[in-house]
Image (cartoon, rainbow, N blue to C red):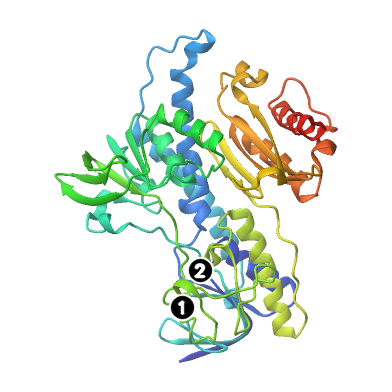
Amino acid sequence: MREIACDVAVIGAGTAGIAAHAAARRAGARALLIEAGPGGTTCARVGCMPSKLLIAAGAAAHAARGAGLFGLDVPEVRVDGRAVLGRLRAERDRFVASVLDGLDALPADERLPGRARFEAPGRLRVGEDVRVGFRAAVVATGSSPSVPKPLRDLGERVLTTDTVFEIPDLPRSLAVLGGGPVGIEIAQAMARLGVEVCLFDAGRSLAGLSHPDLAAAAAEVFGAEIGLHLGVEVTAGAVDGDGVRLTWTAPGGGQEERRFERVLAAAGRPPNVAGLGLDAAGLSLGEKGMPRFDPRTLLCEGAPILIAGDASAERPILHEASRQGRIAGANAAALAAGRPLAAPEPWVDLRMVFTHPQAASVGAPYDAEAGESRVTGAMSFCDQGRARVEGEARGGMRVWTDRGGRLLGGEMLGPGVEHLSHLLALAVQEGMGAARLRARPFYHPTLEEGLETALADIARQLRG
């Protein structure tokens, strides 16, 4: 048995793990990065980047078909599915290679391949022939897609976010289970590339939107391109030739069924904590075997172990995973050296969906029971100047404050939302009031003027 000793053992070489290892090294710790693979981070390999490449292809096809709005004649748009997916994988592989190059630059004695599990407090087994002793550890094992029970016997006919980008050609028809960010992004992109798409979700909102006005607008917008089945439950799936036959409960009762060439399970990515032996490490475990931890220091209860990134299920988004990795790595080094831990203030919650129109949620979530404790400003992109110029006049925005006018958060559905949500997130993070933000310059004609419209609506109500 090979024995290794280190100050900080980092389990997982994704976004959070790489950041944790680097932070621990900067803090002076002897850090070991344990990687089970596949490498390249979830974002680069199967998440943010390949999905955006698919979205970009779908957007190009959609723009070409809609060119008549601007007096342009595009007689035919032909989609070469193999070429679309070939470019996607080629560019995806470039992003992954960049991550792997960074790992390859690490000293050999700071990397250890293999699957890790805790044997006892302060001790890990990696594979079958390596034992690692540590003063502190970081769990950054990421997440994996889940497949609903009705789909588990359908073999390769079921796609996940880990496999959908590997198919050689676009399917003729696709059922997407899950209307959250990943599901709606892929569903719309596939539809714009000529795939007949139906989306199923037990809830009645899409793209993470919860404000009733925006949820209704999203259903109308996306329903024009995708067959939407909201408020339903898929109860069975069966092999049907080279495809799949799904059965689901209809909203009004009874059942419906239909055949699809492929089905995409996009209803979530649970954290990879099973098989780590967390109980052997001395941790206090809660629901579903998850460790209890401080969301600011990221320290778990019961042992000098921290958790970061998707493994924590706290905020499974890349910028949060990177920050959590830095916090966890620095705090692990502090534990190993007997120093106090840092407990930084959390960032404002910021979530984006890169559909067309885009969607975003910022800060405090919508609260249907807030009543008079909140003021909500509204605007519509349907009659907003720049949105109409660009032919993207759909959606709207809701921004809420407390009764004193301090910005709390908001939701958006519209063009350029990835930029508008950053502005609102910055203002919320800085504790700004609606009046102060409105007093800043808003250039004309820009989409940002839509935010000023919502702020003006808040000002009118506060004057009330």
Vertical placement of residue 287 versus 407, above or below? below
Can the viewer see residue 171 in this picture? no
Quadrant location of the N terminus? bottom left
Q: Is residue 367 above or below residue 219?
A: below
* Residue at the extreme left of the image, as rendered: 241
Does the rendering let one see residue 455?
Answer: yes
Q: Position of residue 442 (x, y in %)?
A: 79, 27
Picture quarter containing residue 88?
top left
SS under mark 2? loop
Q: Is residue 414 left or right of residue 235?
A: right
Residue closer to the observer: 330 or 435: 435
Sequence-first disc among 2 and 1: 2
Q: Residue at x 26, y 43 (%)?
A: 253
**Pointer 2 with pointer 1, Cβ within 8 A:** yes
**Residue 141 got which mark?**
2
Residue 276: assigned label: 1
Task: Give the residue drawn at x 61%, y 48%.
Answer: 369
Mark pair 2, 1: CA separation: 9 Å
Quadrant that contains the C terminus: top right
Q: Nearer the viewer, residue 75 or 457?
A: 457
The kind of residue tagged 2 is Thr
Apparent side of residue 40 relative to residue 406 in the rendered image (left or right): left
Q: Give residue 21's quadrant in the image.
A: bottom right
Q: Position of residue 304 (x, y in %)?
A: 63, 83
